[in-house]
Image (cartoon, grey):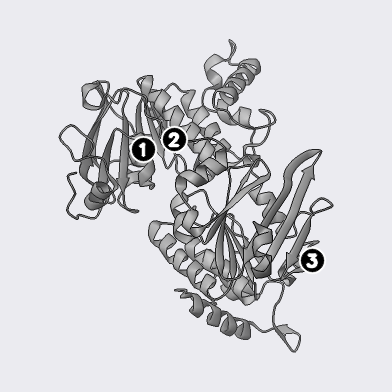
Amino acid sequence: MPGETARHSLLEMRNISKTFAGIKALRGVSLDLRAGEVHSLMGENGAGKSTLMKILAGAYIPDPGSEILINGIPVQIHGPMAAKALGISIIYQELALSPNLSVAENIYLGRELRRAGFVDRQAMIAQSDNVLRRLGAPFKASALVRDLSIAERQLVEIARAIHANSRILVMDEPTTTLSERETDKLFGIVRQLRDDGLAIVYISHRMNEVYALSDRVSVLRDGSYVGTLERDAIRPETVVLMMVGRDLSSFYRKEHDARGSRGKVILSVRNIGDGRRVFDSSFDLHEGEVLGIAGLVGAGRTELARLIYGADACLSGTLTLDGQPCAIKSPIDAIRSGIVYLTEDRKQLGLFLDMSIDENINLGVIGRDAYPGGFLNPKRARERAAQAIQSMAIRAPSAFVPVGALSGGNQQKVLLSRLLETKPRVLILDEPTRGVDIGAKSEIYRLIDDLAKAGVGVIVISSELPEIIGICDRVLVMREGRIAGEVGGPDALPVTQENIIAIATSATAIAA
């Protein structure tokens, strides 16, 4: 605990409490951070992680009795500028960059170099390029931020923190929108910064990332400090138990019959392709089956789902639904046929963030129970939203809260609720637990299992192999736009990470 390592600590947060409108968001939380370490902060959504870090960043003022020390000296952080002056930088999940400015202008924003009263852009570019070279950035400081990828924009944020001589760097869910290759590069940079002496707070819901990077892990639950694990004691089951306060031995729930090839074929896909990213792909989905689709980033998983759903145009192939030919030219055709698709990008392509929970849930079906003459039935809409909130355990003060104000897990539940109101026969879930905490993941897995028990055919696309293995009956593995193999079927190899990766990379699979 903090007292045991105080003499080694760069940062100590002692007895931190924060109250909003009479509600305790934090209750006497303590955290210490050492120079040259990656210290992961974990907890479910609402556990208090963001509130604690916003206090460190100067965005919130803690309650009286809270104390923050840097190098053993008490400090007051009354705003973001005070935090930056103390060497504290935070890279939020939503990157805070100005896309129309250059990389150098973003790095120097608010601290521009001047010469004879004018901004000295050349000097800013030259000094920024020095920092970018240190990070191995593949772009120049003169580039416009709008022309960079998400991974490259994160490098700009990191470069800005380094250039400001930050000693403490907080990274909030930095890999949510990154590919596996980009994530590996980011990990290399994080380790480099740690070796250079920075103290890094790393916030993530992904256990494999935490295990790969962390020197220590601290866990919050319901606004309180639970404990800290040293590197040798970090175990996924231990961290999960600390986060949720209960054993999740049945975390990956699979109580449905797993009928697989014994069940009736709901959806038959034959030789479907778009001629660019998906080629000649065929498979059957059975009633009450959870079918996984795995593969490396760029293998064509999402593109295949979008072709089935009618979001992209097919160049070839046919679909059969419940034994009948099915022509799907658009998402509306798919929904009317009983096929629904949960997008991997819920914020941009799935939800209307400024609209309420009620409005988002009812969006696709509100006309179903309208009064004669086409007048809407607001009472039935409210009832439908209330039922969804209860059955999906959506945590919100009311159904009229904007969806954008909810946590990632609750946003995902709202989107799922809207899809399920259409009473689908086939449910396609693309990265259903991305950016979702452990507790919400468990609830989504329960939902998938319940749908399969009810006879719905479920397709799950996921980059997390433990998730695919834990909840799916069979797994199709894609490589370079084609279905390269299958694991888990009656005549297929067992469902293991080794076999999935072997097929995805064209290596030799392991039978046992």
Q: Position of residue 418 (x, y in %)?
A: 52, 28
Q: Which residue is mark 2?
A: 251
C-alpha separation, residue under disc 3 versus residue under disc 2:
42 Å
Nearer-the-camera pick, 157 or 324: 157
Q: Give the numbered dot on residue 82.
A: none
Pointer 3 with pointer 2, Cβ within 8 A: no
Q: Residues within 10 Å of mark 1 (few under 14, many from 20)?
A: some
Q: Secondary structure at mark 3?
A: strand
Between disc 3 and disc 1, whose residue precedes? 3
Tag 2: amino acid: Phe
440 displayed left or right of 223: left
Between disc 2 and disc 1, whose residue precedes? 2
The residue furthest right is 64
Residue under the point 57% across and 36% down? 410
- The quadrant holding residue 406 is top right
Q: Residues within 10 Å of mark 2 (few under 14, many from 20)?
A: some
Q: Which residue is mark 3?
A: 75
The residue furthest left is 491
Please state the total of marks drawn on the protein image: 3
Pointer 2 with pointer 1, Cβ within 8 A: yes
Nearer-the-camera pick, 136 or 20: 20
Between disc 3 and disc 2, whose residue precedes? 3
Q: Position of residue 39 (x, y in %)?
A: 57, 60
Q: Position of residue 302 (x, y in %)?
A: 36, 44
Q: Is residue 392 above or below residue 370?
A: below
